[in-house]
Image (cartoon, grey):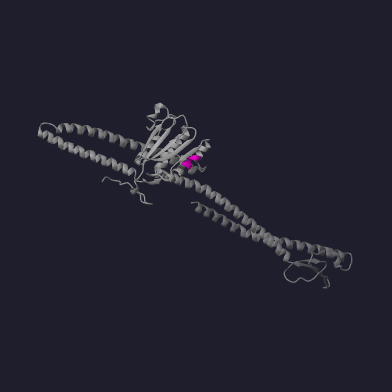
Protein backbone atom coordinates (compact mmCIF):
# COMPACT_ATOMS: atom_id res chain seq x y z
CA UNK A 1 0.00 0.00 0.00
CA UNK A 2 2.72 2.45 1.01
CA UNK A 3 4.72 1.61 -2.13
CA UNK A 4 1.76 2.25 -4.40
CA UNK A 5 0.90 5.55 -2.74
CA UNK A 6 4.54 6.63 -2.91
CA UNK A 7 4.81 5.67 -6.57
CA UNK A 8 1.64 7.59 -7.45
CA UNK A 9 2.78 10.76 -5.68
CA UNK A 10 6.32 10.54 -7.09
CA UNK A 11 4.91 10.08 -10.58
CA UNK A 12 2.80 13.21 -10.14
CA UNK A 13 5.85 15.14 -8.85
CA UNK A 14 8.05 13.89 -11.72
CA UNK A 15 5.46 14.74 -14.39
CA UNK A 16 4.96 18.18 -12.87
CA UNK A 17 8.72 18.73 -12.71
CA UNK A 18 9.22 17.74 -16.34
CA UNK A 19 6.21 19.73 -17.53
CA UNK A 20 7.39 22.89 -15.77
CA UNK A 21 11.15 22.36 -15.70
CA UNK A 22 11.80 22.09 -19.46
CA UNK A 23 9.92 25.25 -20.45
CA UNK A 24 11.33 27.11 -17.45
CA UNK A 25 14.95 26.29 -18.39
CA UNK A 26 14.30 27.21 -22.03
CA UNK A 27 12.68 30.48 -20.98
CA UNK A 28 15.64 31.28 -18.72
CA UNK A 29 18.10 30.70 -21.58
CA UNK A 30 16.09 32.97 -23.88
CA UNK A 31 15.77 35.61 -21.18
CA UNK A 32 19.56 35.73 -20.66
CA UNK A 33 20.15 36.06 -24.42
CA UNK A 34 17.51 38.78 -24.83
CA UNK A 35 18.98 40.70 -21.90
CA UNK A 36 22.51 40.61 -23.38
CA UNK A 37 21.31 41.60 -26.85
CA UNK A 38 19.21 44.45 -25.43
CA UNK A 39 22.19 45.77 -23.48
CA UNK A 40 24.36 45.43 -26.62
CA UNK A 41 21.82 47.38 -28.68
CA UNK A 42 21.65 50.15 -26.07
CA UNK A 43 25.46 50.41 -26.04
CA UNK A 44 25.61 50.61 -29.85
CA UNK A 45 22.93 53.33 -29.87
CA UNK A 46 24.81 55.29 -27.21
CA UNK A 47 28.05 55.11 -29.25
CA UNK A 48 26.15 56.25 -32.38
CA UNK A 49 24.84 59.26 -30.45
CA UNK A 50 28.37 60.20 -29.37
CA UNK A 51 29.61 59.97 -32.96
CA UNK A 52 26.68 62.12 -34.12
CA UNK A 53 27.74 64.75 -31.59
CA UNK A 54 31.24 64.78 -33.08
CA UNK A 55 29.79 65.27 -36.58
CA UNK A 56 27.44 68.00 -35.34
CA UNK A 57 30.38 69.96 -33.86
CA UNK A 58 32.30 69.67 -37.13
CA UNK A 59 34.95 67.48 -35.53
CA UNK A 60 36.76 64.65 -37.24
CA UNK A 61 35.82 61.14 -36.18
CA UNK A 62 37.79 60.19 -33.08
CA UNK A 63 37.04 56.68 -31.84
CA UNK A 64 39.18 57.15 -28.74
CA UNK A 65 36.43 59.34 -27.36
CA UNK A 66 33.97 56.45 -27.46
CA UNK A 67 36.40 53.79 -26.22
CA UNK A 68 35.03 53.89 -22.62
CA UNK A 69 31.62 52.82 -23.99
CA UNK A 70 32.99 49.83 -25.87
CA UNK A 71 32.80 46.65 -23.76
CA UNK A 72 35.94 44.75 -22.94
CA UNK A 73 36.98 42.42 -25.75
CA UNK A 74 34.45 44.24 -27.93
CA UNK A 75 34.95 45.18 -31.57
CA UNK A 76 33.57 48.46 -32.91
CA UNK A 77 33.19 49.12 -36.63
CA UNK A 78 32.11 52.60 -37.83
CA UNK A 79 31.20 53.44 -41.43
CA UNK A 80 30.87 57.17 -42.20
CA UNK A 81 28.70 58.81 -44.84
CA UNK A 82 31.42 58.43 -47.47
CA UNK A 83 31.84 54.71 -46.84
CA UNK A 84 35.09 55.01 -44.93
CA UNK A 85 35.49 52.23 -42.37
CA UNK A 86 37.06 52.82 -38.97
CA UNK A 87 37.39 50.24 -36.21
CA UNK A 88 38.31 49.93 -32.58
CA UNK A 89 39.51 46.69 -31.02
CA UNK A 90 40.39 43.36 -32.58
CA UNK A 91 38.17 41.33 -34.88
CA UNK A 92 36.43 38.49 -33.07
CA UNK A 93 36.71 34.91 -34.24
CA UNK A 94 33.94 32.55 -33.33
CA UNK A 95 30.46 33.31 -32.12
CA UNK A 96 29.51 36.90 -31.45
CA UNK A 97 26.67 39.01 -30.19
CA UNK A 98 26.26 41.96 -32.54
CA UNK A 99 24.21 45.15 -32.55
CA UNK A 100 24.08 48.03 -35.03
CA UNK A 101 22.88 51.63 -35.07
CA UNK A 102 22.68 54.38 -37.69
CA UNK A 103 24.50 57.70 -37.64
CA UNK A 104 23.61 60.95 -39.40
CA UNK A 105 23.40 61.26 -42.28
CA UNK A 106 24.13 57.84 -43.80
CA UNK A 107 26.69 56.16 -41.54
CA UNK A 108 26.42 53.12 -39.32
CA UNK A 109 27.88 51.67 -36.15
CA UNK A 110 28.32 47.96 -35.53
CA UNK A 111 29.33 46.63 -32.12
CA UNK A 112 30.23 42.98 -31.51
CA UNK A 113 31.31 41.07 -28.44
CA UNK A 114 32.18 37.35 -27.94
CA UNK A 115 29.18 35.20 -27.06
CA UNK A 116 31.21 33.13 -24.56
CA UNK A 117 30.10 35.24 -21.59
CA UNK A 118 26.47 35.03 -22.68
CA UNK A 119 26.65 31.25 -23.06
CA UNK A 120 28.32 31.00 -19.66
CA UNK A 121 25.52 33.07 -18.12
CA UNK A 122 22.93 30.94 -19.88
CA UNK A 123 24.58 27.79 -18.54
CA UNK A 124 24.81 29.10 -14.97
CA UNK A 125 21.28 30.49 -14.94
CA UNK A 126 19.86 27.36 -16.54
CA UNK A 127 21.84 25.20 -14.12
CA UNK A 128 20.45 27.21 -11.21
CA UNK A 129 16.93 26.64 -12.49
CA UNK A 130 17.68 22.92 -12.86
CA UNK A 131 19.10 22.86 -9.35
CA UNK A 132 15.95 24.50 -8.00
CA UNK A 133 13.92 21.98 -9.98
CA UNK A 134 15.87 19.06 -8.52
CA UNK A 135 15.48 20.59 -5.06
CA UNK A 136 11.75 20.91 -5.61
CA UNK A 137 11.50 17.28 -6.76
CA UNK A 138 13.56 16.22 -3.72
CA UNK A 139 11.26 18.13 -1.39
CA UNK A 140 8.32 16.61 -3.23
CA UNK A 141 9.84 13.17 -2.72
CA UNK A 142 10.23 13.79 1.01
CA UNK A 143 6.68 15.08 1.23
CA UNK A 144 5.48 12.10 -0.81
CA UNK A 145 7.29 9.70 1.51
CA UNK A 146 5.83 11.33 4.62
CA UNK A 147 2.36 11.45 3.06
CA UNK A 148 2.56 7.83 1.96
CA UNK A 149 3.65 6.83 5.45
CA UNK A 150 0.90 8.89 7.06
CA UNK A 151 -1.70 7.25 4.84
CA UNK A 152 -0.25 3.74 4.73
CA UNK A 153 0.42 3.25 8.46
CA UNK A 154 -3.20 3.90 9.50
CA UNK A 155 -4.40 1.60 6.72
CA UNK A 156 -1.96 -1.07 7.85
CA UNK A 157 -3.07 -0.69 11.46
CA UNK A 158 -6.72 -0.95 10.46
CA UNK A 159 -5.91 -4.06 8.39
CA UNK A 160 -4.03 -5.59 11.34
CA UNK A 161 -6.95 -4.70 13.61
CA UNK A 162 -9.36 -6.46 11.24
CA UNK A 163 -7.04 -9.50 11.11
CA UNK A 164 -6.87 -9.67 14.91
CA UNK A 165 -10.63 -9.36 15.06
CA UNK A 166 -10.95 -12.33 12.72
CA UNK A 167 -8.51 -14.28 14.91
CA UNK A 168 -10.63 -13.65 18.00
CA UNK A 169 -8.83 -10.61 19.46
CA UNK A 170 -11.78 -8.42 20.47
CA UNK A 171 -9.90 -5.78 22.45
CA UNK A 172 -10.84 -2.21 21.42
CA UNK A 173 -8.12 -0.04 19.88
CA UNK A 174 -8.32 3.55 21.10
CA UNK A 175 -5.77 4.85 18.60
CA UNK A 176 -7.11 7.26 15.99
CA UNK A 177 -5.31 8.57 12.92
CA UNK A 178 -6.72 12.02 12.20
CA UNK A 179 -8.27 10.82 8.92
CA UNK A 180 -12.05 10.96 9.12
CA UNK A 181 -12.73 7.91 6.97
CA UNK A 182 -10.14 5.73 8.72
CA UNK A 183 -11.31 6.84 12.16
CA UNK A 184 -14.88 5.96 11.18
CA UNK A 185 -13.66 2.52 10.09
CA UNK A 186 -11.80 2.08 13.40
CA UNK A 187 -14.98 3.00 15.29
CA UNK A 188 -16.92 0.43 13.25
CA UNK A 189 -14.31 -2.25 14.02
CA UNK A 190 -14.48 -1.47 17.74
CA UNK A 191 -18.27 -1.69 17.65
CA UNK A 192 -18.06 -5.02 15.82
CA UNK A 193 -15.46 -6.27 18.30
CA UNK A 194 -17.73 -5.45 21.24
CA UNK A 195 -20.67 -7.19 19.57
CA UNK A 196 -18.58 -10.28 18.75
CA UNK A 197 -17.19 -10.39 22.29
CA UNK A 198 -20.70 -10.47 23.70
CA UNK A 199 -21.70 -13.08 21.13
CA UNK A 200 -18.79 -15.37 22.06
CA UNK A 201 -19.54 -14.98 25.75
CA UNK A 202 -23.23 -15.73 25.25
CA UNK A 203 -22.38 -18.75 23.10
CA UNK A 204 -20.17 -20.20 25.83
CA UNK A 205 -22.82 -19.53 28.46
CA UNK A 206 -25.48 -21.08 26.26
CA UNK A 207 -23.42 -24.22 25.65
CA UNK A 208 -22.69 -24.48 29.35
CA UNK A 209 -26.31 -23.96 30.36
CA UNK A 210 -27.64 -26.43 27.77
CA UNK A 211 -25.04 -29.00 28.78
CA UNK A 212 -25.86 -28.62 32.46
CA UNK A 213 -29.61 -28.81 31.94
CA UNK A 214 -29.45 -31.82 29.63
CA UNK A 215 -27.05 -33.68 31.88
CA UNK A 216 -29.25 -33.00 34.92
CA UNK A 217 -32.37 -34.25 33.14
CA UNK A 218 -30.57 -37.29 31.73
CA UNK A 219 -29.13 -38.17 35.12
CA UNK A 220 -32.54 -37.95 36.73
CA UNK A 221 -34.03 -40.05 33.92
CA UNK A 222 -31.28 -42.69 34.22
CA UNK A 223 -31.83 -42.95 37.98
CA UNK A 224 -35.57 -43.53 37.54
CA UNK A 225 -34.97 -46.05 34.78
CA UNK A 226 -32.42 -47.92 36.91
CA UNK A 227 -35.04 -48.17 39.62
CA UNK A 228 -37.64 -49.45 37.14
CA UNK A 229 -35.14 -51.96 35.77
CA UNK A 230 -35.25 -53.62 39.22
CA UNK A 231 -39.07 -54.02 39.04
CA UNK A 232 -40.27 -57.53 39.84
CA UNK A 233 -42.32 -57.73 36.64
CA UNK A 234 -40.00 -58.95 33.90
CA UNK A 235 -41.80 -57.09 31.10
CA UNK A 236 -41.59 -53.78 32.96
CA UNK A 237 -37.96 -54.40 33.88
CA UNK A 238 -37.11 -55.26 30.24
CA UNK A 239 -38.73 -52.08 28.93
CA UNK A 240 -36.97 -50.02 31.60
CA UNK A 241 -33.64 -51.65 30.69
CA UNK A 242 -34.17 -50.84 27.00
CA UNK A 243 -35.07 -47.25 27.85
CA UNK A 244 -32.02 -47.03 30.12
CA UNK A 245 -29.83 -48.26 27.26
CA UNK A 246 -31.27 -45.54 25.01
CA UNK A 247 -30.68 -42.92 27.71
CA UNK A 248 -27.06 -44.05 28.01
CA UNK A 249 -26.63 -43.75 24.26
CA UNK A 250 -28.19 -40.29 24.36
CA UNK A 251 -25.70 -39.30 27.06
CA UNK A 252 -22.84 -40.54 24.87
CA UNK A 253 -24.16 -38.57 21.90
CA UNK A 254 -24.38 -35.47 24.09
CA UNK A 255 -20.79 -35.96 25.22
CA UNK A 256 -19.66 -36.34 21.59
CA UNK A 257 -21.56 -33.22 20.50
CA UNK A 258 -20.06 -31.17 23.31
CA UNK A 259 -16.60 -32.54 22.50
CA UNK A 260 -17.12 -31.64 18.84
CA UNK A 261 -18.20 -28.13 19.78
CA UNK A 262 -15.11 -27.67 21.96
CA UNK A 263 -12.87 -29.10 19.22
CA UNK A 264 -14.37 -26.74 16.63
CA UNK A 265 -13.71 -23.76 18.88
CA UNK A 266 -10.14 -24.93 19.45
CA UNK A 267 -9.48 -25.54 15.76
CA UNK A 268 -6.75 -22.89 15.67
CA UNK A 269 -4.88 -24.21 18.69
CA UNK A 270 -1.21 -24.89 18.07
CA UNK A 271 1.98 -25.44 20.05
CA UNK A 272 3.18 -22.11 21.45
CA UNK A 273 6.37 -21.39 23.35
CA UNK A 274 5.47 -18.96 26.11
CA UNK A 275 9.12 -17.85 26.24
CA UNK A 276 8.54 -16.42 22.76
CA UNK A 277 4.86 -15.49 22.92
CA UNK A 278 4.67 -13.73 26.30
CA UNK A 279 7.43 -11.10 25.67
CA UNK A 280 5.54 -9.83 22.61
CA UNK A 281 2.30 -9.52 24.57
CA UNK A 282 4.01 -7.90 27.55
CA UNK A 283 5.91 -5.39 25.41
CA UNK A 284 2.63 -4.22 23.89
CA UNK A 285 1.37 -3.25 27.35
CA UNK A 286 4.64 -2.08 28.93
CA UNK A 287 4.50 1.33 27.25
CA UNK A 288 0.90 1.91 28.37
CA UNK A 289 1.73 1.11 31.98
CA UNK A 290 4.91 3.19 31.81
CA UNK A 291 2.86 6.16 30.59
CA UNK A 292 0.80 5.72 33.77
CA UNK A 293 3.98 5.72 35.89
CA UNK A 294 3.85 1.98 36.54
CA UNK A 295 6.14 -0.95 35.79
CA UNK A 296 5.43 -4.29 34.13
CA UNK A 297 7.64 -7.25 34.94
CA UNK A 298 7.75 -10.69 33.38
CA UNK A 299 9.02 -14.06 34.63
CA UNK A 300 9.00 -16.92 32.15
CA UNK A 301 11.17 -20.04 31.84
CA UNK A 302 13.46 -20.51 28.86
CA UNK A 303 11.04 -22.95 27.23
CA UNK A 304 7.42 -23.70 28.06
CA UNK A 305 5.29 -25.20 25.29
CA UNK A 306 1.50 -24.95 25.62
CA UNK A 307 -1.44 -25.79 23.41
CA UNK A 308 -3.38 -22.60 22.63
CA UNK A 309 -4.66 -20.31 19.91
CA UNK A 310 -2.31 -17.30 19.61
CA UNK A 311 -5.04 -14.69 19.16
CA UNK A 312 -7.10 -16.07 22.06
CA UNK A 313 -4.08 -16.14 24.35
CA UNK A 314 -3.21 -12.53 23.45
CA UNK A 315 -6.80 -11.49 24.03
CA UNK A 316 -7.11 -13.25 27.39
CA UNK A 317 -3.82 -11.90 28.77
CA UNK A 318 -4.59 -8.50 27.25
CA UNK A 319 -7.88 -8.39 29.17
CA UNK A 320 -6.08 -9.17 32.43
CA UNK A 321 -3.39 -6.53 31.79
CA UNK A 322 -5.99 -3.96 30.81
CA UNK A 323 -7.90 -4.80 33.98
CA UNK A 324 -4.69 -4.27 36.01
CA UNK A 325 -4.07 -0.97 34.19
CA UNK A 326 -7.58 0.38 34.68
CA UNK A 327 -8.44 -0.92 38.15
CA UNK A 328 -5.17 -2.04 39.75
CA UNK A 329 -2.11 -0.27 41.07
CA UNK A 330 1.63 -0.54 41.50
CA UNK A 331 3.82 -2.97 39.62
CA UNK A 332 2.14 -5.55 37.40
CA UNK A 333 3.80 -8.97 37.15
CA UNK A 334 3.25 -11.60 34.48
CA UNK A 335 4.78 -14.98 35.29
CA UNK A 336 4.62 -18.45 33.79
CA UNK A 337 5.65 -21.85 35.10
CA UNK A 338 5.08 -25.55 34.58
CA UNK A 339 3.10 -27.23 37.33
CA UNK A 340 2.60 -30.99 37.05
CA UNK A 341 2.05 -31.03 33.30
CA UNK A 342 0.00 -27.83 33.22
CA UNK A 343 1.25 -24.38 32.25
CA UNK A 344 0.30 -21.71 34.78
CA UNK A 345 0.24 -18.02 33.80
CA UNK A 346 -0.27 -15.52 36.63
CA UNK A 347 -1.10 -11.82 36.27
CA UNK A 348 -0.97 -9.87 39.51
CA UNK A 349 -0.73 -6.22 40.61
CA UNK A 350 -0.34 -4.35 43.90
CA UNK A 351 -3.64 -2.50 43.83
CA UNK A 352 -6.54 -2.62 46.24
CA UNK A 353 -7.73 -5.92 44.79
CA UNK A 354 -11.19 -7.27 44.10
CA UNK A 355 -14.00 -6.42 46.55
CA UNK A 356 -15.23 -9.41 48.53
CA UNK A 357 -18.78 -9.09 47.24
CA UNK A 358 -17.56 -9.36 43.63
CA UNK A 359 -14.89 -12.03 44.02
CA UNK A 360 -17.25 -14.96 43.43
CA UNK A 361 -19.00 -13.25 40.49
CA UNK A 362 -16.04 -11.56 38.80
CA UNK A 363 -16.27 -13.71 35.66
CA UNK A 364 -20.01 -13.28 35.18
CA UNK A 365 -21.04 -11.16 32.25
CA UNK A 366 -22.21 -7.69 33.24
CA UNK A 367 -20.52 -7.78 36.66
CA UNK A 368 -18.17 -4.83 37.25
CA UNK A 369 -17.21 -2.81 40.28
CA UNK A 370 -15.89 0.20 38.34
CA UNK A 371 -18.67 1.08 35.91
CA UNK A 372 -17.28 -0.83 32.91
CA UNK A 373 -19.23 -3.17 30.64
CA UNK A 374 -18.33 -6.32 32.59
CA UNK A 375 -17.70 -8.27 29.37
CA UNK A 376 -13.89 -8.47 29.37
CA UNK A 377 -13.24 -11.07 32.06
CA UNK A 378 -16.18 -13.20 30.95
CA UNK A 379 -14.84 -13.15 27.40
CA UNK A 380 -11.29 -13.92 28.53
CA UNK A 381 -12.45 -16.96 30.48
CA UNK A 382 -14.54 -18.12 27.49
CA UNK A 383 -11.51 -17.87 25.18
CA UNK A 384 -9.29 -19.80 27.58
CA UNK A 385 -11.98 -22.44 28.03
CA UNK A 386 -12.30 -22.75 24.24
CA UNK A 387 -8.65 -23.85 24.08
CA UNK A 388 -9.16 -26.43 26.80
CA UNK A 389 -7.75 -24.21 29.54
CA UNK A 390 -9.12 -22.61 32.64
CA UNK A 391 -9.04 -19.15 34.21
CA UNK A 392 -9.75 -18.25 37.80
CA UNK A 393 -9.18 -15.60 40.44
CA UNK A 394 -6.45 -17.00 42.70
CA UNK A 395 -6.37 -14.21 45.29
CA UNK A 396 -8.55 -11.14 45.67
CA UNK A 397 -5.95 -9.02 47.56
CA UNK A 398 -3.73 -8.50 45.75
CA UNK A 399 -5.66 -9.37 42.62
CA UNK A 400 -4.05 -12.42 41.05
CA UNK A 401 -5.61 -14.05 38.01
CA UNK A 402 -4.39 -17.45 36.89
CA UNK A 403 -4.63 -19.11 33.47
CA UNK A 404 -4.13 -22.87 33.24
CA UNK A 405 -3.23 -24.20 29.80
CA UNK A 406 -2.59 -27.77 28.67
CA UNK A 407 1.03 -28.75 28.06
CA UNK A 408 1.36 -31.30 25.25
CA UNK A 409 3.21 -34.53 25.79
CA UNK A 410 6.58 -34.90 24.11
CA UNK A 411 5.18 -37.24 21.44
CA UNK A 412 2.34 -34.84 20.64
CA UNK A 413 4.60 -32.18 19.11
CA UNK A 414 6.86 -32.68 16.14
CA UNK A 415 9.60 -30.17 15.48
CA UNK A 416 8.16 -27.27 13.54
CA UNK A 417 4.78 -28.98 13.09
CA UNK A 418 1.60 -27.83 14.82
CA UNK A 419 -1.61 -29.78 15.20
CA UNK A 420 -5.27 -29.13 14.64
CA UNK A 421 -8.09 -30.49 16.74
CA UNK A 422 -10.40 -33.05 15.21
CA UNK A 423 -13.56 -31.05 14.37
CA UNK A 424 -15.92 -33.96 14.75
CA UNK A 425 -16.69 -36.90 17.05
CA UNK A 426 -14.87 -40.19 16.59
> x and y percent of residue 47 in the render?
81, 64
Left or right placement of residue 167 versus residue 231 in this view: right
> x and y percent of residue 404 in the render?
37, 39
What residue is drawn where x is 32% and y is 44%?
A: 264
Marker count (numbered): 0
**Residue 164 occupies which quadrant of the picture?**
top left
Left or right placement of residue 222 versus residue 169 in this view: left
**Residue 305 occupies which quadrant of the picture?**
top left
Residue nearest the observer in this picture, 66 or 241: 241
What residue is drawn where x is 31% and y is 44%?
A: 263
**Residue 31 occupies which quadrant of the picture?**
bottom right
What residue is drawn where x is 34% and y is 44%?
A: 266
What residue is drawn where x is 57% and y is 50%?
A: 143
Residue 376 seen in the figure: no
Left or right placement of residue 144 versus residue 258 in this view: right
Residue 264 seen in the figure: yes
Residue nearest the observer in this picture, 406 or 309: 406
Residue nearest the observer in this picture, 289 or 399: 399
Residue that lies at the very extreme toward the front in this rendered image = 340
Residue that lies at the very extreme toward the right in this rendered image = 58
Q: Which residues are magenta?
A: 282-286
In this rendering, is residue 345 above or below 50? Answer: above
Q: Is residue 137 magenta?
A: no
> x and y percent of residue 345 in the render?
41, 39
By secondary structure, the bulk of the magenta-drawn segment is best described as helix
Amino acid sequence: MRKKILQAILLAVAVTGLALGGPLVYTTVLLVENTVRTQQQETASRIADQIDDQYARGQALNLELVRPAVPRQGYLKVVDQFGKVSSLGSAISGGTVSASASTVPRGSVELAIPDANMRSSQLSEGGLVMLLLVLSVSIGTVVATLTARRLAEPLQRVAERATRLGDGDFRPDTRRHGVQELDALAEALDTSAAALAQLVTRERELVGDVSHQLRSRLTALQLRLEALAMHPEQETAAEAGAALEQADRLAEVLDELLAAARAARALGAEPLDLAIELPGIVEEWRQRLRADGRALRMKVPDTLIVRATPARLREAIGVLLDNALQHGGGTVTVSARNSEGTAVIEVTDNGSGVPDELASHIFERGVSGHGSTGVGLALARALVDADGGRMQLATARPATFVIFLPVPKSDDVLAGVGWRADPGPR
